Image (cartoon, helix red, strand yellow):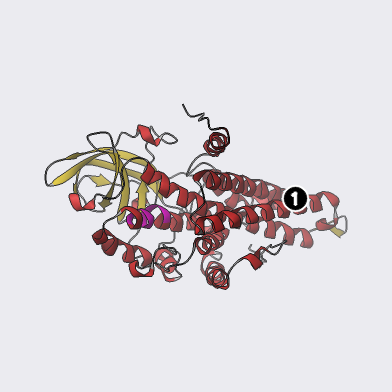
Amino acid sequence: MAYPFTHPDYVLVDELLSDENKIVRSAVRDWVNRSVIPVIDEAAHQHHFPRHFTRELGEIGAFGPFIPVEYGGAGLDHIAYGVIMTELERGDSAIRSAASVQTSLVMYPIYEFGSEEQKRKYLPKLATGELIGCFGLTEPNHGSDPGGMETRFKDMGDHYLLNGAKMWITNSAIADVGVVWAKDESGVVRGLIVEKGMPGFTAPETYHKWSLRASVTGEMVFEDVKVPKENLLPNIKGLKGPLMCLNSARYGIAWGAVGSAMDCYNTALQYSLERKQFKKPIASYQLQQKKLAEMLTEITKAQLLIWRVGVLKNEGKATPAQISMAKRNNVEMALRVARESRQVLGAMGITGDFPIMRHMMNLESVITYEGTHDVHLLITGADITGISAFA
């Protein structure tokens, strides 16, 4: 059961948004209400991603909204990207993940590091959803330490030969193109655009997940894959490239997590006003009011934090550490709100009649991917002390 959504905005954060931001949010919110909410619970139950969503996400401008218009994007600012992610994750983390990967991990590196030919070839079709993309960085043996990656490629004269494997890749089984990070013969990390159908490239799907069940997750396996030399991203070397992509994705996640929290809070509030015990709505009891008040307080703090980071990002001032703080804080907040909301609903909270357990299970992945909860804490620690705890 999905209650009509009322946007929580306790300190009038909306007044800080531009009219353009609000128009974009309204369009995406309408799409989520119309297309996602009615089907997403069943999709999660069936471990199924509704493929028609990709073209619809393209139609509403959710792919590459900050990419310039000349390359198929909408040319919007980073706060517009953020409010889009919030609305999509209010629907489900899987929908936001699909848009986040397409935007920050595929379109962004092609735009930022690619040749003009690569931009013209891929970006317009990625923007419309005609092409689906994925991002290959994490490996079976290397998650938080991407510098240890074992995927490598060799220069064979007229092409590169790629070998290795990537794991936990959103969209991999349905992707037409992948931005893959691998080490060259000198051990330098480079980005390659790999296309579906290249001999030796397979992308088996990962099943039996308890989380992100409406998302396509899989592997990328490369066995002597011949990659044309024009598919190398020419304008980046080293781990700086994938880490810049992750910063963009983490920023979107920090906005998106607020959407999950808002949906859980809205569900708990509406249920508490309807549900009666001892002849009164449970919303009239002190402990339920405490839960609701604390949830709204945390959501409000997260809204202000990510809005400020969005302003800094628009100004080119947002640091990776600031983005890490926002991602860590907002996802942890959303998970706490989901758990408290479930308690407000009692036993009904564990059923598929309400979205809370779906959000809670999704957030268990979101708190780990694009940098684990602990790694983001250590990024902040290193930033404030000047001492890295990673080595």
Q: Eyeballing the image, is 372 above or below 263?
A: above
Any magenta on residue 351? no
The range drawn in magenta is 104-110
Any magenta on residue 109? yes
* Residue 148 drawn at (x, y percent): 36, 32
Give the residue at x 36% y 40%: 239
Can residue 210 be seen by looking at this rendering?
no
Give the residue at x 32% y 65%: 125
| Left or right for 364, reference 125 | right
Give the residue at x 78% y 62%: 273
* Residue 213 drawn at (x, y percent): 49, 50
- Which of the 4 quarters of the picture holds residue 167? top left
Can residue 305 be seen by looking at this rendering?
yes
Q: Which residue is mark 1?
A: 294
Q: Eyeballing the image, is 229 above or below 371?
A: below
Depth check, front residue: 380 or 144: 380
Placement of the N terminus among the 4 image quadrants: bottom right
Q: What main secondary structure does the magenta stretch of the protein show?
A: helix
Categorize mark 1 by other alpha carbons within 10 Å: few (<14), some (14-19), many (20+). Answer: some
| Left or right for 352, reference 183 | right
* Residue 73 drawn at (x, y percent): 39, 67
At label 1, which amino acid type do we have?
Glu
Q: How many marks?
A: 1
**Identity of the residue furthest to the top in this view:** 391
* Residue 78 drawn at (x, y percent): 50, 60
Q: Under tag 1, what secondary structure?
A: helix
**Identity of the residue furthest to the left in this view:** 157
**Identity of the residue furthest to the right in this view:** 279
- Which of the 4 quarters of the picture holds residue 364? top right
- Which of the 4 quarters of the picture holds residue 101? bottom left
